[in-house]
Amino acid sequence: MGMEGFAVPSGPTADYGASLTFSVILTCVMAASGGLIFGYDVGISGGVSSMESFLRQFYPGVLKKMIEKGTSNEYCVYDSQSLTAFTSSLYIAGLFASLVAGKVTKAIGRQAVMLLGGAMFFAGAALNAGAVDIAMLIIGRMLLGFGSGFTNQATPVYLAEIAPPRWRGAFTSGFQFFLSVGVLIANLTNYGTNHIKRWGWRLSLGLAAAPATVIVIGAFFLTDSPSSLVVRGKLDAARAALRRVRGPDADIDAELKDVIRSVEESKKNEEEAYRRIIRREYRPHLVMAIAVALFFQLTGVIVLAFFSPLLFRTVGFGSDAALIGAVILGAVNLGSISVSTFTIDRLGRRPLFMIGGLVMIVCQVAIAWIMGAQIGHNGEGTMPHGYSVAVLLLVCGHSAGFGVSWGPLNWLIPAEIFPVEIRSAGNGITSAVGLGCTFIQTQTFLAMLCAFKYATFAYYAGWIVIMTTFIALFMPETKGVPLESMNAVWAQHWYWGRFVRERNQVIDESA
């Protein structure tokens, strides 16, 4: 068989006449609900870490500094490597899971991987709820990490493969939407359980089983993606899956033919996927696999989401007020994700990156200025209430800028830019980089806040300037382009075109 499947078309092709069917909406919504798992964890750990009942049982040294607040450096009250390990251990486990998730996905399919991830998350939630020492907490968190690693790798790619090209952005951003719903639910849960003085933290951690149950049950009702079914030789099932999600007017045979062609080419080199992706002709894809995941972390939003209750307590809020601040932050993030869902396939990817980047830069610089002016370099000042509220509003503004840009696009871009022969490897690298950076940041943020003080936020603002400039120069627009035609976008780019054209020249000569 020739290699014509990789030829660069003159431009984006048709989307096979696919319509927006009830089946594809239901399928994508059920799959995207996997984001609840990751979102609930993002929101729950920071709130639990600020609960006095939790600190009293596991981290009495931190509680002592909290009680003595006002006599020590405000920036360093929560600086504890053991406390940050409670949050970060999940992500080192997720890193290892993401490295093997690609091979597991090829063997059993994306649907089964989502089911496996949900089951592991359920087990981790149960262990955390019953924890009696730090070791049980960490083991439970690592089980949660394995579950997150599998679902985070499988779900966005599943959504990109199953959604019609015209609405791929909206459906794939649904993962981030449900992630934000999970964060908001977690923050509301923390606020409620904070009033249960002895065991409220157990309820917060144990209720992580609820979103795990949603994805486990939902996975049973999902059809696997056509690409995944073709990889495993189930052509009739792939045709049935396409017919189910594309509608009666779609050209099922044409799309299935393209999927089969892409999968056959990928099978020839599937054992060399990681070696292939480092070749010169795949340079754009490798750079983006690393850069998008890395820059997503360097927006600072992950650590703000994890540790927002601790940050709000640092700037002067009480326990309940800090948790309410986290609830407000979660609601703002959810609202901004909703806006992105309805604009991502209209405005495109690049404009949202630019808008979000500008908003985040302004907010981070303003937070640094207020904290420096009010708390001071040594952290001995007391911030007036009005300035504390201003910090809350700026953190919310930063979250809104993130929610319309990097939030959904972090999941969408890696899911749609890779050719099928390196798609699993590319997403595996993206997941590994993202989870690795999350581990490093969650483990070091409170220590960095203690060392850098208010300059911590200027540090993140500087990175957002760099990443926004990078996107403006090197990220092509991928709005509405079928996955099978994505090569054309790279071939027409002012810089990456030289690599992709070289690749296609080699392919054409070998055909």
Image: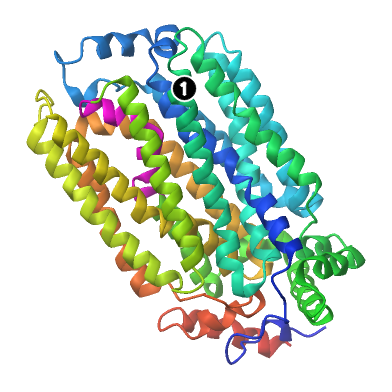
Relative height, residue 206 to residue 159 (above, below): above
Q: What colour-coding does the image apply?
A: rainbow
Please say whether residue 91 is one of the residues in the magenta stretch. Answer: no
Q: Magenta segment, principal secondary structure?
A: helix
**Quarter of the image holding residue 72?**
top left
**Residue displayed at 25% across by 43% down:** 393
Q: Residues within 10 Å of mark 1 (few under 14, many from 20)?
A: some
Residue 66: x, y in percent? 27, 14
Relative height, residue 81 to residue 96 (above, below): above
| The residue stretch that appears in magenta | 297-316
Query: Which residue is disc 1 drawn over?
Result: 192
Q: How many marks do you count on the picture?
A: 1
Relative height, residue 334 to residue 404 (above, below): above
Foreground residue, 233 or 367?
Answer: 367
**Residue displayed at 52% across by 84% down:** 491
For label 1, the SS is helix
Residue 366: x, y in percent? 17, 48
Foreground residue, 414 or 265?
Answer: 414
Q: Amino acid at mark 1?
A: Gly
Quarter in which the C terminus is drawn: bottom right
**Residue displayed at 85% across by 66% down:** 238
Relative height, residue 226 to residue 385 (above, below): below
In the displayed structure, does residue 111 sit left or right of residue 399? right
| Residue 502 in view, yes or no | yes
| Residue 453 in view, yes or no | no
Residue at the extreme right of the image, as rendered:
236
Quarter in which the N terminus is drawn: bottom right
In the displayed structure, does residue 325 sit left or right of residue 156? left
Foreground residue, 58 or 95?
Answer: 58
**Quarter of the image holding residue 77?**
top left
